Every structure is written in C-alpha cells, then in structure tokens.
Image (spheres, coloured by chain):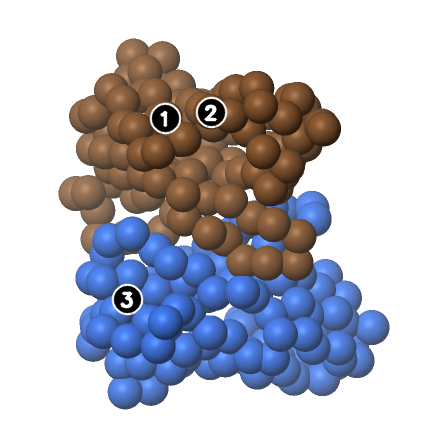
Amino acid sequence: GEDVEQSLFLSVREGDSSVINCTYTDSSSTYLYWYKQEPGAGLQLLTYIFSNMDMKQDQRLTVLLNKKDKHLSLRIADTQTGDSAIYFCAERDPLWSSARQLTFGSGTQLTVLP
Amino acid sequence: GAGVSQSPSNKVTEKGKDVELRCDPISGHTALYWYRQSLGQGLEFLIYFQGNSAPDKSGLPSDRFSAERTGGSVSTLTIQRTQQEDSAVYLCASSFKGETQYFGPGTRLLVL
C-alpha cells in the first residue's frame, strides 16, 4: 500500500521561499495533493499534480515531482505570515483501483518568522 | 452549498455513550469520504461512498463505527459505546465521482 512521509517542521523568514518535501512509495498512476490546515480548521486544497507530470505552477505555488526518486515538493514563493500552517502531502489510490482514499503524510508545520 | 459542512463543530460526550456526526457534501458531488485526525495516528481514512455502490468500509477501526448516506447526499457517522481513544477530529470530504476531494471543517469529538 501507499506510504507517505514528510519532515515535521520548517521555519522561514517572511519574504523567503519555503520548500516542503514529501516522499511516497507507490509508483502507479495517480494524483498527488497538497493541503493546508490552519489551527482549528479543516483541510484546504492548495494544488495537485498527476504522477506523470514534472512540474505545476499556480501563482506563488510550484509543485515539483521527481518520479524516479518518488519525491514531491511544494515551493511557496515570497512566504507570508498568513502561510503559517500545517501542510499535508497526500497520495490517492491508483487510478486502476476502485478505491479512492487519500493516504496522508504526517504534515509539516510551517512557521513564518517576521 | 458553497462547501462541505459538518455538524456539530464540537462534541463532548461521556465514555460509553453513542454519538452521531453529520456531513453535508457539496451539491452535485457523488462521492463522500470520512477521515479521522488524531494526535497519535495522523489522518486516517475511514469510509468512502460513491453513488449507489456499496461503500468502501475498509478503514473503519471497529464494529462500533458505522456510517450511512441517505439519498446520495447527507451522511451520518455513528460511533457506538464511545471510548476515550475515539477522541479526534472527524473530517468529511466530497468529490465529483472519484476526483479531487474537498474537505469540511471537521467535528472535534472529546470523549471523557
């Protein structure tokens, strides 16, 4: 089955770029997601990428996918204090499967320092 | 509606009591999911409903947990004889068919 891993903490200065990393194990065709969770709130979808793509950019967010190493990263440009939150990487069950569950990493707590 | 809604937002109950958690998916979404978020276990899948198909219950942790989805829309997650280890945030998500999942704000359950 899928296994998704993330580092637990990241601190950056306001205005710098943040890079949050994630590794996954399943090589099947699927989608990979980034969600953001602020204190006391649910999960907010940030972006997603299909497993045969290398990169996706959406305003300040850039997702990079290294299929060979099964490594996914989320880069946030010009990080702001409002970006402080927990960021979850998630892998969906393979497209050939009838299952549709997401397997989540442990989450990375991003702290943006003024 | 504009997004997935869940009720109640917070629930405190005593050990041994039954609780019901409700989820209203995004209008038009055919799939509905329940997840549990706890300190020790992170985010775990519980159950998945897709249209009129039999639900995928593979993530339910015990037979004290059950869920139903009436009329292909609203879903209720029921936990019978609650235990302290059931304390967690219960998150509901919906999607159009099996595509991108959008989450509700969650129900925070505390079992005393």
**Residue A58: x, y in percent?**
32, 34
Please report the residue visible at 60 percent of the width from the left and 70 percent of the height from the top: B107
Determine which residue is flagged by label 1. A62
Tell me which amino acid carries mark 2: Ala
Q: Which residue is mark 3?
A: B31
Amino acid carrying label 3: it is: Ala
Farthest residue to the top: give it. Answer: A68
Please state the horizontal and vertical placement of residue A9, each as a whole percent of the image. 66, 27
For label 3, the SS is strand
* Chain letter of the residue beneath label 1 in the structure image: A
> Which numbered disc, 1 or 2, marks the residue closer to the eye?
2
Q: Secondary structure at mark 1?
A: strand
Q: Using the rendered view, name the quadrant where residue B81 is placed.
A: bottom right
Type of amino acid at the residue the image marks with label 1: Thr
The image shows residue A17, relative to residue B71, as above or below, that is above
Q: Which of the chains is brown? A: A
Name the quadrant containing residue A52: top left
Disc 1 packing (10 Å; few <14; some 14–19; many ≥20): some
Residue toward you, A31 or B60? A31
Element at label 2: loop
Apparent side of residue B15 relative to residue B92 in the rendered image (left or right):
right
Residue under label 2, please give it: A77
User: Contact (CB < 8 A) between labels 1 and 2?
Assistant: yes
Q: The N terminus of chain A appears in which quarter of the rendering?
A: top left
Q: Chain of mark 2?
A: A
State the image coordinates of residue B85 (x, y, percent, origin top left). Answer: 72, 61
